[in-house]
């Protein structure tokens, strides 16, 4: 006898369909292909990649600097030929193939934050990032007074944007800020500095979503740098402190001197980059000639002093450790850095500014014979570096992390705040935001 076929009532069929629909919705929202997981995968892979590239960038930059220094030891006159020709060639290559790779890289990320999708065409494109990497190494290879830290910011933002594009995640301003901040963290091996520069320089608005993305990217890139390069400090550990009575005297002097000097440098660089004054505008229109003259200036200063090539890391570290250098070192390094910055080549001012600040601190040491020399030098560095970049919190965090001078945190902060105020009187516009105007003009339709 055949059994009758039992069918589900319509209500049960409807419940099953609703259950299946809920499972599909949950899978779409939280499954492996869900937007939240794609966003997390993009952030994680981008932070790891940019951390590795930042370490490679550091190794390549160190190799280029050492190669050029070896050349100067073998043939002291060689830079008089190599440097001007190198400046001219690199400026031409930059203008011809990657015009948005010139300069620091931080102004480009500031502009890219405003229209991230449009920035993918050039400001933070793969082509621009590759050119930035190679041309910055080339700049150090011909003796330019420059650094890799600013360029690392632009390269890192491009890598983070590429990772989000690969995982089909919308590219927002937070992606650019997170990439640039993680680049700073990996370049200096200073995670806290990555967060502070995101707040002070790269981000106009700092919302909750951006906070999470920045913190994740900085943490991952910092772990990559720490895991491969080890727990090192850029200038070595400087375990110095400053008694309160001495700090009350040294801090305002270092802040005022650093703010004046740094503000003058920023104003000179902004004027040479943006001023409509006819002779300056004429030089900008003849960019290759300007690059050649900049190369000649850097070569003559370098050959005459032997101390202003590249980042001048060694002289700066010797000053921090108590060695004496000629009194003109700081001003010579500042002039060489200014000439390099207006040449049109890729390169940053972070590391050179630290060296100039060390030279300024060395000038201040005789004024305070009873104060620890290393502490006075670090306060001079904080004052000048803040005067240039106008980001006091970032300056303090970078200096405390790259020297391990945590006992000087309050004097460093006071010096930076004073320097920021004084520099604002000398140069009202902040350096990177002023330089970004040139790139923003290129982005206009």
Image (spheres, rainbow, N blue to C red):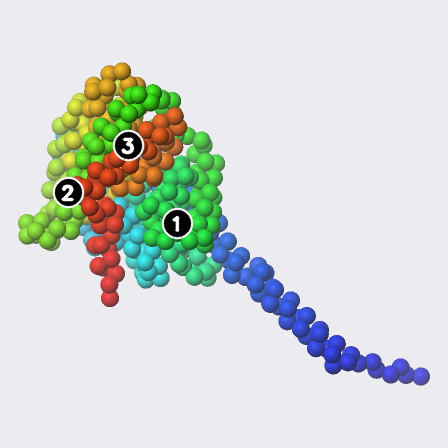
Residue 118's spot in the image, x, y percent?
32, 62
As displayed, is residue 339 above or below residue 23? above
State which tag comes first along the sequence, 1 or 3.
1
On residue 268, the disc is 2
Q: CA distance from mark 1 to mark 3?
A: 29 Å
Between the C-alphas of marks 1 and 2, the distance is 29 Å
Q: Regarding mark 1 in the picture, which secondary structure is present there?
A: helix
Q: Earlier in the sequence, mark 2 or mark 3?
A: 2
- In this rendering, the answer to whether 22 lies above or below 95 is below
Q: Residue furthest right?
A: 1
Q: Name the one closer to the observer, 11 or 370.
A: 370
Residue in the image at 30% along x and 41% along y: 391
Local crowd size for mark 3, using a 10 Å CA cut-off: few (<14), some (14–19), many (≥20) = many
Relative height, residue 335 to residue 317 (above, below): below
**Is residue 90 among what the camera can see?**
no
Q: Between residues 366 and 57, which one lies in front from this camera angle?
A: 366
Seen at 22% across and 36% down, the residue is: 259
**Spot occupied by residue 401 in the image (x, y as percentages of width and height):** 38, 32
Corner quadrant of residue 368: top left
Q: Are marks 2 and 3 in contact (CB under 8 Å)?
A: no
The residue that disc 1 covers is 179
Instruction: Measure the alpha-carbon separation of dots 2 and 3.
Output: 23 Å
Q: Which residue is mark 3?
A: 415
Q: Position of residue 83 (x, y in %)?
A: 17, 38
Q: Nearer the viewer's eye, disc 1 or disc 2?
A: 2
First-in-chain label (1 vs 2): 1
Of residues 111 and 31, which is closer to you in this image?
111
């Amino acid at each position: 006898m055949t059994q009758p076929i039992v069918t589900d009532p319509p209500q049960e069929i409807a419940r099953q369909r609703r259950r299946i629909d809920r499972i599909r919705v949950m899978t779409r929202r939280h499954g492996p292909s869900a937007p939240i997981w794609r966003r997390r995968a993009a952030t994680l892979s981008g932070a790891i990649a940019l951390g590795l590239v930042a370490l490679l960038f550091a190794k390549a930059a160190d190799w280029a600097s050492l190669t050029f220094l070896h050349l100067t030891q073998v043939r002291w006159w060689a830079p008089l030929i190599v440097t001007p020709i190198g400046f001219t060639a690199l400026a031409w290559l930059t203008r011809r193939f990657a015009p948005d790779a010139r300069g620091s890289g931080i102004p480009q990320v500031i502009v890219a934050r405003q229209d991230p999708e449009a920035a993918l065409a050039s400001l933070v494109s793969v082509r621009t990032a590759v050119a930035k990497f190679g041309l910055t190494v080339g700049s150090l290879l011909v003796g330019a007074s420059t650094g890799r830290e600013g360029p690392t910011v632009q390269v890192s933002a491009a890598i983070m944007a590429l990772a989000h594009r690969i995982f089909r995640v919308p590219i927002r301003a937070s992606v650019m800020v997170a990439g640039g901040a993680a680049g700073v963290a990996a370049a200096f091996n200073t995670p806290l500095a990555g967060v502070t520069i995101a707040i002070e320089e790269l981000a106009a608005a700092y919302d909750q979503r951006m906070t999470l993305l920045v913190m994740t990217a900085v943490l991952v890139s910092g772990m990559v740098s720490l895991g491969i390069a080890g727990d090192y400090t850029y200038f070595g550990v400087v375990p110095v402190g400053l008694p309160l009575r001495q700090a009350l005297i040294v801090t305002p002097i270092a802040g005022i001197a650093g703010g004046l000097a740094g503000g003058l440098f920023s104003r000179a660089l902004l004027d040479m980059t943006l001023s409509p004054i006819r002779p300056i505008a004429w030089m900008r229109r003849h960019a290759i000639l300007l690059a050649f003259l900049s190369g000649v200036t850097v070569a003559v200063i370098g050959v005459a002093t032997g101390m202003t090539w590249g980042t001048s890391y060694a002289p700066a570290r010797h000053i921090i450790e108590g060695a004496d250098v000629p009194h003109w070192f700081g001003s010579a390094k500042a002039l060489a850095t200014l000439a390099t910055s207006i040449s049109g080549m890729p390169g940053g001012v972070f590391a050179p500014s630290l060296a100039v600040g060390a030279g300024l601190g060395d000038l201040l040491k005789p004024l305070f014979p009873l104060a620890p020399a290393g502490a006075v030098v670090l306060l001079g560095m904080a004052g000048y570096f803040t005067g240039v970049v106008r980001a006091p919190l970032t300056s303090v965090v970078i200096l405390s992390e790259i020297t391990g001078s945590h006992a000087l945190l309050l004097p460093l902060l006071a010096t930076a705040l004073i320097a920021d105020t004084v520099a604002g009187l000398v140069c009202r516009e902040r350096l990177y935001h002023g330089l970004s105007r040139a790139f923003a003009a290129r982005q206009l339709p």
